[in-house]
Each structure stands twice: as C-alpha cells, then as structure tokens.
Image (cartoon, rainbow, N blue to C red):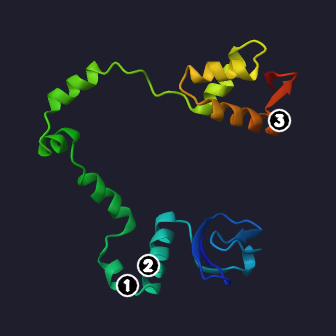
Amino acid sequence: MYAIVGCSSCSNLWLIEGRSKTVQCPRCGSRRPYEKRRKFLETDDPDHAREVRASMLASRQGESDAFARVDAFGDLEDTVEDGVIPDEEYLEAAGLDVDELAAAGDRNTRQPASQSKRAVVEEALETLESPTEADIVDYATDRGVEATYVQSALEKLVRRGAVSESRGTYRLL
C-alpha cells in the first residue's frame, strides 16, 4: 500500500510505502504516529500515488495548467525511450568520425582508474610487514599520494580503531 501523507509542522507532502507505527517527515524531521498523519490518498498503485502527489504539488505552486498538459507518469517513460538518439548518430551530428573514435578507444593503453588515497594507505598497511609511518609514506608517495595525506589518514585510522600503533609500528585491525 502507498499513501500520500502530509506534515502538520512544515506542510511537506511525501509518499510512503507500507505502514509503520511512526512516520518521520523527511523535510523537518518531526515524528508522529502513522494514524495521526494526514493521509491524502491510500492506493496499491505506486504510479497513481506519484501522479496525485505531483498534481498536489503543482496545484500548490499555481501550476495546475502546466501539470495538466504533461502526459501521465507511466507514459513519460515510454516517451523518453522513444526519444533517445543512438550514440553513433549523436556523434556524427556533432561532426565527429565514429570509426576514428572507436579506433582511438582501442588504442587506449592507460591503466584502469587508480585507487583512492585511503585505499593506497590501507594497501600499504596490508602489504608491508611491520610498517612504520616512514614505510607507509614511502609506499603511498610511490603511488601518487601526498605524505601529509598519509599522516592524516593514519591518525584518523588509529583514532577510529581500524589501525593500531605500537612503538612506531602500525597494524591493520
């Protein structure tokens, strides 16, 4: 079951699925029992519920006429699918040679996207045996991570309890 409910504190309208004991407004955070929330519509059809909520929001903003000119929610998806231009046609219309682009993609010899900085620090902790801060910094800087970031990341990981530090040696927990 789907319901359009309203908030008495901020006048927000939103859609909920199912039925819980309490419902919290996503805008202002007020929490009230489900039974005390004003329900504008209860239906088993999610598309119908979305359509009615959109209509109510348009009406609030004085845009009822504009909303009436828009197709039904379920029909919009079909309209979008019909209006998609194939990649080749789009590229040709932009004046690009599709075959040349495909050949350039085949020639691309770059490595896959690099790891995040944090992943590099964690990898150093996993890979190195009894690593010190200097060892981890060396490992990470060889992979393009700044030393200041490594030091900051190690402090945060220790504070968070993900890493232990004893006598200058770090260990991943």
Residue occupied by mark 2: 55
**Could you tell me the amino acid type at mark 2?**
Ser
Residue 71, position as x, y percentages in the image: 31, 70
**Residue shown at 73% from the left, 65% from the top:** 20
Pointer 1 with pointer 2, Cβ within 8 A: yes
69, above or below 160, in the image: below
Q: Quadrant of the C terminus?
A: top right
**Could you tell me the amino acid type at mark 3?**
Gly
19, above or below 98, in the image: below
**Residue shown at 33% from the left, 62% from the top:** 76
92, above or below 53, in the image: above
Apparent side of residue 168 relative to residue 123 in the rendered image (left or right):
right
Pointer 1 with pointer 3, Cβ within 8 A: no
Q: Secondary structure at mark 3?
A: loop
Pointer 3 with pointer 2, Cβ within 8 A: no
Q: Which mark is residue 161?
A: 3
